Image: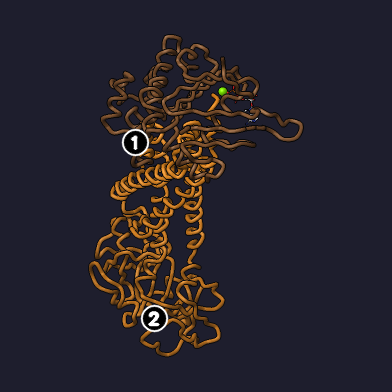
Amino acid sequence: MQALKIEHVDQFFGTGASRVQVLHDVNFEAKAGELSLILGPSGSGKSTLLTIAGGLLTPTKGNVQVAGVELGQASAKQKEQLRLNHLGFVLQAYHLLPFLTVNEQFKLVDHVKKSGNLSADALTHLLEELGLTPFVNAYPSSLSGGQQQRVAIARALYPDPAVVLADEPTAALDSTRVMQVGQLLQDLAHDRQKAVVIVTHDVRLRALADHVYDMVDGRLTQAQ
Amino acid sequence: MFLALKEMRKEKLRYSLIIAMIVLISYLIFILTSLALGLAQQNTDAINSWGMQSIIMNKDADISLSQSLIKKSQAPSTLPKSQAYIAQAPIVAKKSGHDQVSGTFIGLDNDQFVAKKITLTSGHLAKSRYQLVVDDAFKESGYKLGDTFKLNGNAHAYTIVGFTHNAKMSVAPVAYGRLSAWATLKNVPTTMIASAIVSTKTAPKAGNSALHTYDKDTFVQKLPGYSAQNMTFEMMIGFLLVISLIVIAVFLYILTMQKQQNYAVLRAQGIPGSVLVKSTLSQAFLMVISGLVIGVILTVVTAMAMPSAVPMAFDVPILGAVALALVVIAMLGAVIPVRSILKVDPVSVIGG
Ligand SMILES: Nc1ncnc2c1ncn2[C@@H]1O[C@H](COP(=O)(O)OP(=O)(O)O)[C@@H](O)[C@H]1O
Ligand SMILES: [Mg+2]
């Protein structure tokens, strides 16, 4: 079953003369256990597509299905629950709450989502894998960009989502870290059976992906 | 609560400063309230101690005890048990080596109910024209039992034969004496019998067309400066409450604006807006409660350090009501930033 399915999605912004079409009949699927990479230049509509896939924006036209839920039919509350339970976001910036330590970023999720989160052991293991064990009591401001990004990935994984959506996850990283984080996202797909979708203009990630798509002026095509 | 507490712990300085503002405001409100109450009491202590319900005065006296005069011919030959003469005259006590004390002379008939209501802390009631029972405030100016002094520059000396506590009218000490001493002190002809008749009944008949009955509240409100004073304090306290509303609303609003991006991420992650709203409201609550607790401690310390001459009265129910008003107002102030939390657009965090 597809964890994420996007069918015939059009997105327009603005009204009247300033009305522009940002997405043209986009069709896309992501399956558990696979890493999909959407490559495209800045302004091509990648983030818009991710926003729609995450249920944050309702497309002008078309259907979106996440973890079996048809978003067009879901209430705002249901979409909120869907994001909390089944979607993990890995964003370029502002991912962590500055006034919570690494550990508390996860505790916050416990306060809101009472069950279905990673067990304490699994979290410890995940943090160890990510090399974050020494920093569990540190505040984000004392971590490097790469460390923060890894915490954000752990945070996205903690509720054990079916789908992980990453928007330019490597944009804030120096080049040595880029492949590390990319590898990590690939492991999520392959080892943890998540449907991982990365949108980026960073072609270095290409080698890691199971499926590569090109986004050009709002049109999505499967890359050769 | 989790978010609220964690954030306050991380941003100690920020939140301490806001709490410090609340401490200062609540302290000022408490002190002003106590002063207002103290002053109000010193305006009316003596009157309250009489246990009167109404007062009969000259109807042309503008409800002012000092302006009211009752002629013997206007008064009944004998007063019922529920009524008593009150004869008011301004006095200045003067004795060499002592401070001058200005106060109010109240002439009484020892057989009537007002004289019986006076509780003495020492001595006895005035048995003759030249004896006085005075408020404890005279002690603070160095007067003792048995001291003699001149009143209003009259030749005859008056003797203190008793002390009473909390006998104040318009914040000046009262000296109780005999009705017969009054005409001379007030400088009125002896055809006048008293300033007014007070009654324990709510609406006794005035009995003469020159006289009129007023209830106690009307009389108290018309005491010189009384309502103006109260209004001044009420205005100050009201403004302080409004200022605290603005301070809390503005600070929380600024803090919220700084956190917009964080909130947007949390909303994108599916954290319900209600969690963030609760966090902000509990922060406001925690801040105002901590501020109040410190404010109360400061007020208690002040109360203990304050010299007794300062008219302050610490009334727990009234101060409690004021504190509650402050809490309610702080929570109202916290509702303003709540609107901007709910308006946060999670889309804004995607795309960088
Ligand atoms: N809310 C919006 N209103 C109007 N135009 C928008 C809005 N969001 C995005 N766009 C436009 O849509 C296009 C695609 O943007 P975006 O999806 O952010 O591209 P990418 O992530 O590939 O850089 C851009 O031209 C951008 O200006
Ligand atoms: Mg983008």
Residue B31, given in percent of the width and then of the height, sits at 39, 50
User: In the rendered image, which quarter is residue B2 located in?
Assistant: top left
Q: Which residue lies furthest to the right in this view?
A: A17
Q: In which chain is the residue bearing label 1?
A: A
What amino acid is found at the position of numbered circle 1 in the picture? Answer: Asn
Q: Mark 2 belongs to which amino acid?
A: Thr
Quadrant of residue B76 in the image? bottom left
Element on which disc 1 rests: loop
Mark 1–mark 2 CB contact (< 8 Å):
no
The hue of chain B in the figure is: orange
User: In the figure, A127 relative to B317: above or below?
Assistant: above
- In the rendered image, residue A55, in percent from the top left (x then y), is placed at 53, 36
Q: What's the colour of chain A in the image?
A: brown
Residue sitting at 67 percent across and 32 percent down? A13
Q: Residue at the spot x=48%, y=86% of the render? A: B205
Instruction: Residue under label 1, please give it.
Output: A117
Q: Callout 2: 10 Å neighbours few (<14), some, many (20+)?
A: some
Left or right, B73 with reference to B145:
right
The x and y percentages for residue A16 are 75, 35
Q: Name the residue under label 2.
A: B200
Q: The C terminus of chain B lies in which quarter of the figure?
A: top right
* Residue B148, visible in the rendered structure: yes
